[in-house]
Image (spheres, grey):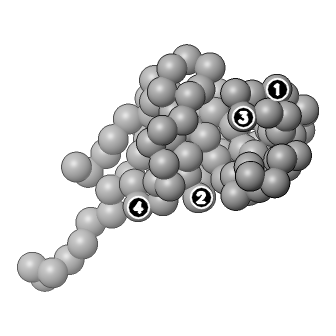
Amino acid sequence: MADLVVPRFINCCNCGNHVCFHDDVISKDFQGRNGRAFLFSHAMNIVVGPKEDRHLMTGLHTVADIYCSDCNEVLGWKYEKAYEESQKYKEGKFILEKPKIVKNNW
């Protein structure tokens, strides 16, 4: 029992729903609409909205806003397509904005 590892969750700031594991953080050096944001490899308990093209700091991307599945809080977005070769690594990844998430089990 001493070796039991408890996962560290990232939760929705509004309702506390688990939306990511801390271990899925790829980068903490992103910018969201409301300040600092994190890039995650996976997300859970979310709803993905409709796709749209958006001009972001790194160029044109097709993205879809992501919402908490419990309270519908907008948490960030999912990168669906990157048009510049140097940005392709973001495809299928998730941006979660720091003001929209909180740590749990830390």
Where residue 42 is drawn, which disc sits there?
A: 2
Front one among 96 and 104: 96
Amino acid under label 3? Answer: Thr
CB-based contact (under 8 Å), mark 3 and mark 2: no
Q: Residue at x 56, y 28 (%)?
A: 31
Q: Earlier in the sequence, mark 3 or mark 2?
A: 2
What residue would you read off at disc 3? 58
Q: Residue at x 90, y 32 (%)?
A: 53
Amino acid under label 2? Answer: His
CB-based contact (under 8 Å), mark 3 and mark 4: no
What element does badge 4 sit on?
helix
Distance CA(mark 3)–CA(mark 2): 21 Å
Q: Earlier in the sequence, mark 2 or mark 1?
A: 2
What residue would you read off at disc 4? 23
Amino acid under label 4? Answer: Asp
What residue would you read off at disc 1? 55
What element does badge 3 sit on?
loop
- Residue 72 appearing in the image: no
